[in-house]
Image: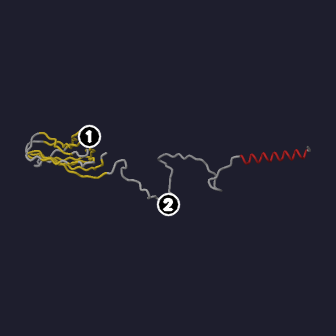
């Protein structure tokens, strides 16, 4: 072969090699056509110097499937306020609350008062009696002492709590006292809710 043929073949081989390298070489990526190249970046800021975030444009809220705003882990709740009372003395009375069939009572707040007529008794608390799984328990709520000179000797109490009572059981109250009296009255008001029992 003549020298010009070798030169021509060498030039052609060189151009093919350049073409292959050009096609196979990585290129800078762009975010949008004609935009600046995309750069992977990691932004690390402290809590005292957070990365500012602002909404661009308008936000749309899809209300076709509303988000629940109550405790979805509990069945439907029916709010209740109940009063129970007990009188010890000549005219004994007991006014308990009966939990409806198929419902469980959850008591969240208890308040009330006790009063003493005659005698030297001192009421120092009220026992709220509830039944769960066939066992009754008395939950004691301390009372303040009556004001000196108060003829009714009234003692008050109130407390946030969490008590349970099973379906078809009774919630009652008993005064916790020492000494003797002609009559001791205790009344409690309770707030909470009923839920379906399983």
Outermost right residue: 2
| Residue at the image position 22 percent from the left and 45 percent from the top | 169
Where residue 92 sits: x, y (%)? 11, 46
Residue at mark 1 to residue at mark 2: CA–CA distance? 55 Å
- Disc on res. 181: none
Task: For label 2, count other residues whose C-alpha is less than 10 Å away and answer few (under 14), some (14-19) or many (20+).
Answer: few
Q: Nearer the viewer, residue 102 or 95?
A: 102
Residue ID for mark 2: 58
Mark 1 crowd level (few <14, some 14–19, many ≥20, 10 Å Cα):
few
The picture places residue 126, in percent across and down from the top left corner, at 18, 43
Give residue 103's position: percent from left, percent from top: 27, 48
Name the quarter where the C terminus is drawn. top left
Q: How many marks?
A: 2
Q: Nearer the viewer, mark 1 or mark 2?
A: 1
Residue identifier under label 1: 133
Of all residues shown, which one is farthest toward the bottom? 58
| Front-lying residue, 48 or 88 | 88
């Amino acid at each position: 072969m003549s020298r010009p043929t070798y030169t021509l073949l060498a030039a052609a081989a060189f151009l093919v090699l350049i073409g292959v390298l050009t096609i196979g070489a990585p290129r800078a990526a762009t975010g949008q056509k004609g935009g600046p190249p995309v750069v992977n970046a990691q932004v690390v800021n402290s809590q005292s110097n957070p990365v500012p975030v602002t909404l661009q444009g308008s936000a749309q809220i899809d209300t076709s499937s509303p988000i629940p705003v109550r405790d979805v882990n509990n069945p439907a709740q029916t709010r209740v306020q109940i009063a129970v009372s007990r009188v010890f003395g000549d005219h004994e009375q007991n006014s308990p609350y009966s939990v409806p069939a198929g419902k469980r009572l959850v008591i969240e707040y208890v308040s009330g008062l006790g009063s003493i007529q005659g005698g030297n008794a001192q009421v120092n608390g009220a026992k709220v009696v509830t039944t769960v799984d066939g066992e009754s328990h008395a939950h004691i709520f301390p009372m303040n002492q009556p004001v000196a000179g108060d003829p009714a000797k009234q003692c008050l109490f109130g407390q946030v709590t969490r008590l349970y009572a099973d379906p078809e059981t009774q919630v009652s109250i008993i005064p916790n006292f020492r000494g003797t009296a002609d009559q001791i009255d205790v009344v409690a008001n309770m707030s909470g809710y009923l839920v379906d029992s399983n």
